């Protein structure tokens, strides 16, 4: 029986605009590179976890496309949190002895396809889904749901637009140190790719009041892969293993009298921290899904970095920068705001957390030992999923 599971290989495809490459091709490139990073071969893979955009058939096709013969297969699809769920499920399979090398992949070409992820028509849930008759008739876009949460947070707690902007400023501070993020911003037509101030963020156009353009994630192409392995395999991989210490999964949906400012992280986070035996105060790096600045603010509160309603004051003064004490350092690769967001970003949270714990980040936190990756899938002001993973550089 394996005693632990570790991330032993990672890869993030560097291109954020790939009009001549399919999502499957991007995933295959990333998967092969992640296996090389681990010093493993495709024939070593006996677990496959995939959340490729598209229907069930396309996700199952990854085994055939990559020439794999997995005995554990998981196509869990809960939006941006899918990959944190995959890590939890892969770890369980490894600990149960059902597989030893689990490959997690993702790829999408939403930018090349000009998909209007945040501002397009509201999604159709199906006739038997509560969202279809309770929400869809009102025409709220995805970003409108997040803007609703931001407005409510401001009303309830006095949070200001300037405080939300601090999250964008800290994230850009990290992005300008990441050559891939700078290249991404240039490729996607950002007019300015240097550091930002709070005033810069507040001067950008309103997309859905109170959220402004520089508080909204980019829409890019992209792909990535993560390899998890048993402790037996991890002992012989090319780079130091990064151990999965704890995980938690939860869902959240609107209820009469419910609090839309409270996210699924309020349930998934405590489970993950308790299993890992650590607290938010111990965390060096927080990789938190930044579809919008308000996502980060509410999740920081719900994970326990500060009390509910105190997120605005907590993020002030550059606290979340990698080079400031009092952290944790936030989204040190540049995040979904300024590095990549192909539609579902949760996998890239795990990749950058692993870089930090290996000492390989472009905004490296000195001596980083513990990281949290939290994915959010769905719509924050409505139904969504939250997946929390605690990673550590030391063996559990």
Image (cartoon, rainbow, N blue to C red):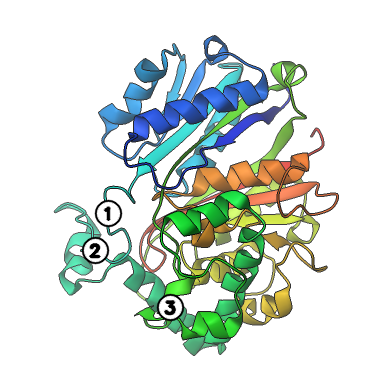
Q: Which residue is mark 3?
A: 212
Classify residue 162 as left or right of residue 7: left
Count of marks placed on residues: 3
Most foreground residue, 316 or 113? 113
Task: Residue 18: name its quadrant.
Answer: top left
Q: Is residue 259 visible?
A: no
Above or below for 143 versus 113: below
Q: Which residue is mark 1?
A: 115
Give the mark toward the camera: 1 or 2: 1
> Could you classify mark 1 by the number of other residues whose Cα lies within 10 Å: few (under 14), some (14-19), or many (20 or more)?
some
Q: Secondary structure at mark 1?
A: loop
Q: Which residue is located at x 48 percent, y 85 percent?
A: 203
> Could you classify mark 3 by the number of other residues whose Cα lies within 10 Å: few (under 14), some (14-19), or many (20 or more)?
many
Task: Where is residue 48? Give x, y as percent.
Answer: 47, 23
In the rendered structure, are the residues bearing label 3 and label 2 in contact, judged by CB atoms less than 8 Å apart?
Answer: no
Q: Which residue is mark 2?
A: 120
């Amino acid at each position: 029986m394996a005693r632990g599971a570790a991330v032993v290989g990672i890869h993030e495809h560097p291109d954020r605009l790939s009009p001549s490459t399919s999502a499957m091709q991007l995933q295959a490139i990333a998967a092969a590179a992640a296996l090389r990073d681990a010093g493993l071969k495709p024939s070593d893979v006996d677990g496959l976890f995939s959340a490729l955009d598209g229907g069930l058939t396309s996700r199952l096709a990854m085994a055939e496309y990559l020439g794999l013969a997995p005995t554990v297969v998981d196509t869990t699809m809960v939006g941006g949190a899918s990959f944190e769920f995959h890590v939890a499920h892969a770890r369980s399979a490894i600990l149960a002895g059902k597989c030893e090398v689990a490959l997690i992949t993702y790829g999408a070409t939403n930018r090349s396809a000009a998909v209007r992820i945040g501002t397009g028509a509201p999604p159709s849930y199906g006739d038997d889904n509560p969202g279809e008759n309770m929400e869809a008739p009102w025409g709220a876009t995805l970003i409108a749901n997040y803007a609703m949460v931001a407005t409510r947070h401001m009303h309830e707690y006095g949070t200001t637009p300037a405080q939300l902007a601090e999250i964008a400023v800290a994230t850009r501070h990290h992005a300008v140190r990441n050559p891939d993020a700078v290249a991404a911003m240039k490729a996607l037509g950002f007019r300015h790719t240097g550091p930002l101030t709070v005033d810069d963020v507040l001067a950008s156009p309103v997309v859905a009041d109170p959220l402004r353009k520089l508080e909204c994630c980019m829409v890019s192409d992209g792909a990535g892969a993560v390899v998890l392995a048993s402790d037996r395999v991890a002992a012989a991989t090319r780079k130091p293993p990064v151990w999965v210490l704890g995980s938690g999964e939860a869902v959240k949906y609107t209820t009469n009298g419910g609090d839309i400012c409270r996210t699924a992280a309020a349930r998934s986070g405590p489970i993950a921290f308790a299993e890992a035996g650590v607290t938010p105060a111990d965390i060096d790096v927080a990789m938190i899904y930044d579809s919008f600045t308000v996502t980060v603010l509410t999740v920081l509160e719900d994970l326990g970095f500060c009390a509910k309603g105190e997120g605005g004051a907590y993020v002030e003064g550059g606290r979340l920068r990698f080079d400031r004490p009092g952290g944790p350092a936030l989204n040190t690769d540049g995040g979904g705001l300024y590095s990549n967001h192909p539609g579902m970003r949760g996998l890239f949270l795990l990749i950058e957390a692993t870089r930090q714990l290996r000492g390989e980040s472009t905004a490296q936190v000195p001596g980083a030992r513990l990281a949290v990756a939290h994915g959010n899938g769905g719509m924050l002001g409505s139904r969504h999923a939250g997946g929390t993973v605690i990673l550590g550089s030391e063996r559990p």
